[in-house]
Structure formats: structure tokens, C-alpha cells
Amino acid sequence: MKKKIMALGLVAMMALSLTACGGNSGEGGSAEGGTKITNVSYDPTRELYTEYNQAFIKHYKEETGKDVEVVQSHGGSGKQARSVVEGADADVVTLALEHDITLIEEAGMIKSGWLSEFPLDSSPYTSTIVLLVRKGNPKNLTDWDSLIQDGVEVITPDPKSSGGAMWNFLAAWQYIKEKSGNDEAQMKDFMAKLYGNVTVMDSGARGATTTFVENGQGDVLIAWENEAISTVKEYPDDYEIITPSISILAQPSVAIVDENADKNGTQELCKAYLDYLYSDEAQEIIAKNGYRPSNQDILNKYGDTFDLNVKLCNIQDFGGWNQAYDDFFADGKIFDEIYSK
């Protein structure tokens, strides 16, 4: 099969996007001060953490009297995890999936048991995967099986570098698994056809959104729900969201990078930073940025924003993240198999 994938975003794969918030412009992050932390996150959380960081800085000042600074870094989730292992000075990570944080743990930089350090498996918000189409849905795309039709151009990021892309793949796989009665040959054939229609595969979810929205490429974007919601809010006359019949409960994870936090003297600040994500104020900010709050009452308040009736599988349906990664995304496994056809 002739691949049409364009090599977009290669420069972006080589760099981190850094943004600083806060009133302390000194060194910070030192054992003496511990007043600056770096949050290494994934692509679509830029706006969420820009707003959250300001709220946290104000809260922390009121609680402790201390000024703090938060530096943001964004990119494809898998790439971000590797950057931490390779030396990026992250105090905390807020990544797209548990497996990416496990990679940092396996490098000895995060203590075991991190998944239970914060509530709900250290997942203060969730999301799911939807289809973003152009207004009027000119290709009449209704569900996952629409995406394998001839002439449909699909945009989705690369599972080798993007956590969101892995969620995309698993959501589509679960759909065909249920539809085919778990017929592996049909499932692989379906996924090969779907990815055969992918015309651009960026390194991260935000890059894929840019390709679809700003560059005008493709008929459908397989997207984080929050990315789709944000796009429709900004361009209400140009795009609409299609919720597939089956999707997946995507659970981004958060953790303290203990090795760096100990070195920087920021353990207490890091814990306060991640704890506050579960506060009512933060949960409202999360909802307003298109993520599903872990607080059920606040989630229900935003029932007009989120489709709360969509059928969602979860990562345990794939044996957990370690099993899912080994089965689908490790070199030579199912993604490589179907993509090489």
C-alpha cells in the first residue's frame, strides 16, 4: 500500500514548548527555595494548564504566603516521557496515559506506587475520543466504519509518539472487535483500511488539530474530545463533532518526578500542585477547557458539553496499559503489522 503520510512536525519533535507562569523570576526549584516547578505535559493541555497555573499560584500564595512559578512544557506524550528520562528537569508530569509515566518510573525517577499517590489512579480528569468533521458533514461520516470508505481522508497523530493516538487506535479497535464478534482477521483488516486512509500523521495531537483546522487538510480528525470542543467553540460555523457509537475512557495521569523534585527541593510544592487539581475550582477549570472532571457533580453540571451517554470501554478491557502497549504499539506488534500492509 502506497503511503501518503506527510512528514509534518519533524522540527516540533525535536523541541519542547516552554511557557512560564508566576511571580517568582528567580532561580527557584532549588533546595533553598523550591519555588519554581516545571510541568512536562502533553500537547492539548496548553490552555488548561495556562489557566490552572494562575489559579494555583493565587491559591498557594493565599495558603502559604509564598510566590511560586510554574513552567509548562508540551509535546507528544511519548516524546515528553522520553525527554524526562533523557534529562528534562520535570518536577511533575501530566501525561496522556499511565504507560508514559511508567517509562519514567522504570528509569528510576519516580517511586513505585505513584498510581495511588493521588485519587482515582492519579487521574484528576478524563476524556474520550471523538470525530471532528467539517460543518455539514459533507462526507456523511457517522461512526468508525465510515472512516474506511474510499475517498475519506483521515487525520490522526502517530501512536509511536502520541498518547492520544494510542487512545484513538484502541477506541477504533474496540468498535470493530464488538462489531466483528472478536474476529481477529476482520479486526486487523478494518484497522489496515482505516490507517490506509490516513493522509497526515503528526507527532502529537495538537499538531494533528493544526493540520486539520488551520491547514485545511483531511475530511475527519480523530481527536481528543477537549480538542474537538475547543475547535467548535472557536469556529462554530466551520466544524461539528460526531460522537462514535463506541469510544474509550481516556485517563491522563499525573505524577511527581521524585528524583528531580528531591534534587530541586520541590516535593511539597509538587504535591500541593497536583493535589489542587482535585479542588472544586480546578475541576471547574478542567470542565471549561473540555476535559471531563473527576468530580461527578461538576461533570454532571456540564452535561450539555459532554455526551455522558456514549458507550465507553476502558484500558482494563485491553489488560491494562502495559499489556496494551506490548500487544499493539511495541515494535513489530499490531500497529506495525497493520500499518505496513
Image: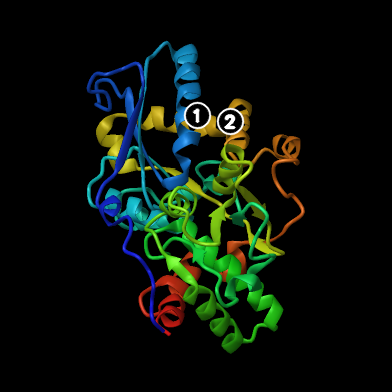
Q: Which mark identifies residue 52?
A: 1
Work out which quarter of the rendered image holds the C terminus and state it.
Answer: bottom left
- Residue 68: x and y in percent read 36, 20
Q: Is residue 313 visible?
A: no
Nearest to the observer: residue 89 or residue 166: 166
Q: Which mark identifies residue 231?
A: none
Q: CA distance from mark 1 to mark 2?
A: 7 Å
Q: Residue at x 60, y 56 (%)?
A: 133
- Residue 109: x and y in percent read 31, 49
Q: Residue at x 50, y 22 (%)?
A: 55
> What is the secondary structure assignment of the residue under circle 1?
helix
Q: Which mark identifies residue 285?
A: 2
Q: Is residue 66 left or right of residue 131?
A: left
Work out which quarter of the rendered image holds the N terminus and state it.
Answer: bottom left
- Residue 141: x and y in percent read 66, 65
Q: Residue at x 58, y 48 (%)?
A: 228
Nearest to the observer: residue 212 or residue 224: 212
Q: Is residue 257 visible?
A: yes
Up the image or down, 293 lies above or below 250; here it is above
The colour mode here is: rainbow
